[in-house]
Amino acid sequence: MLKKLIATTLMCAAGASLMAQTVINGAGASFPAPVYQSWTYTYSQTGPNKVNYQSVGSGAGLNQIKAGTVHFAGTDNPLKLEEQEETGLHQFPMLLGGVVVIVNLPGVKTNELKLTREALSEIYLGKITTWNDPKITKVNPGLKLPKTKITVVRRADSSGTSFIFTNYLSKISKEWESKVGAGASVNWPVGIGGQKNPGICNNVAKIIGSIGYTEYTYAVEANLSCAAIENQTGKFITADVESFSASAANADWKNAPGFYMVLTDQPGDKSWPITGVTYILFRKDADPALRQDMIKYFNWCFTTGATAAQKLNYVPMPQNVVDMIRAQVFK
């Protein structure tokens, strides 16, 4: 009888605990999805509450948080302070990462192909159409590049990764800036579309002679060849955590209203030129109890989650920036 009573008590306690557990739903950018999904899984298994994150793209995530259908959103296309105030949203940076250029050229290994700023922008403008174009071969004397047609792959959805990439192209090419510009969705001059970062990787993997852009972890996991890209100082840089970190070395977060920051084309010999910041958005009018549960989770991400982020080739925010976020947003 006593055993039965104890068992019943334990079951009731477990049921009450389960009922008390908060479910926090997030959606948005696919750029940080590998680490966000790792975090939500671990936290849901070991933490006090359950967290879900759907990789739907920055644009869709922004629409959902504005509509109040999710509790937080991920975006790589940050909102300026005025828009944060207009929409009633808090914004803070969660991670740094890199957008890389991936290619499908048989026999060309990762980081062997070099692309200048001019060549990359003209490929996406549709002005360079074959891999043996002189503007590509002149900086790749050791590679036998084919006459193969270049198939440009770009995003078909509203994408923070596209914002980072097109922001970079706008900085390095006046023609791109005037004809296309920067944004989560643009009128691409050429190319075939793919949905989210996995869609870009799938298309590049299938099409010989193709070129695309994606967040670095996706390229690594798909075993795709990355190109070395010319940075602002004229150095050809390979993508890794160190070169992403170098891009953020001079970031002045204290003078970034609403934490709005774009880190493309930063100075420095070791800086990766297409580095991006990925952000979290949540509503200022969130239920107070839910807000506290979200802040507990975000603080866990900044501390316990930092190791997982580094293993997946992301750069955690520096401690001084985390302290600013806690003082300005989590207060």
Image: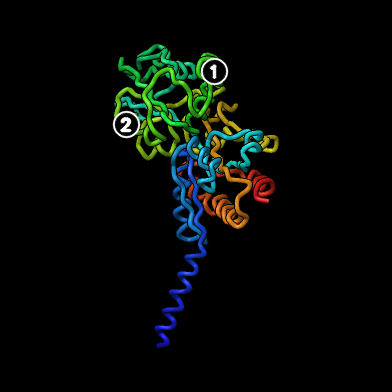
Residue 7, position as x, y percentages in the image: 41, 79
The part of the image, by quadrant, that contains residue 90 is top right
Q: Which mark is residue 5?
A: none
Q: Is residue 288 visible?
A: yes
Percent from the top left, x then y, of residue 171? 56, 21
Q: Quadrant of residue 115?
A: top left
Q: Which mark is residue 177?
A: 1
Task: Out of 24 and 161, give the one closest to the viewer.
Answer: 24
Residue located 49% across and 65% down the image: 19
Tell me the amino acid under the disc marked 2: Ala
Gap in Å between the C-alphas at discs 2 and 1? 29 Å
Neighbours of disc 1 within 10 Å: few (<14), some (14-19), many (20+) = some
Residue found at x 47% / y 57%: 44
Give how far across and how far down residue 72 sits, in percent: 54, 46
Residue drawn at (37%, 20%), measured in percent from left and top?
142
Quarter of the image where one finds residue 88: top right
Q: Residue at x 48, y 27 (%)?
A: 185
Q: Which residue is mark 2?
A: 205
Please report contact status of discs 2 and 1: CB closer than 8 Å, yes or no.
no
Q: Is residue 191 above or below residue 218?
A: above
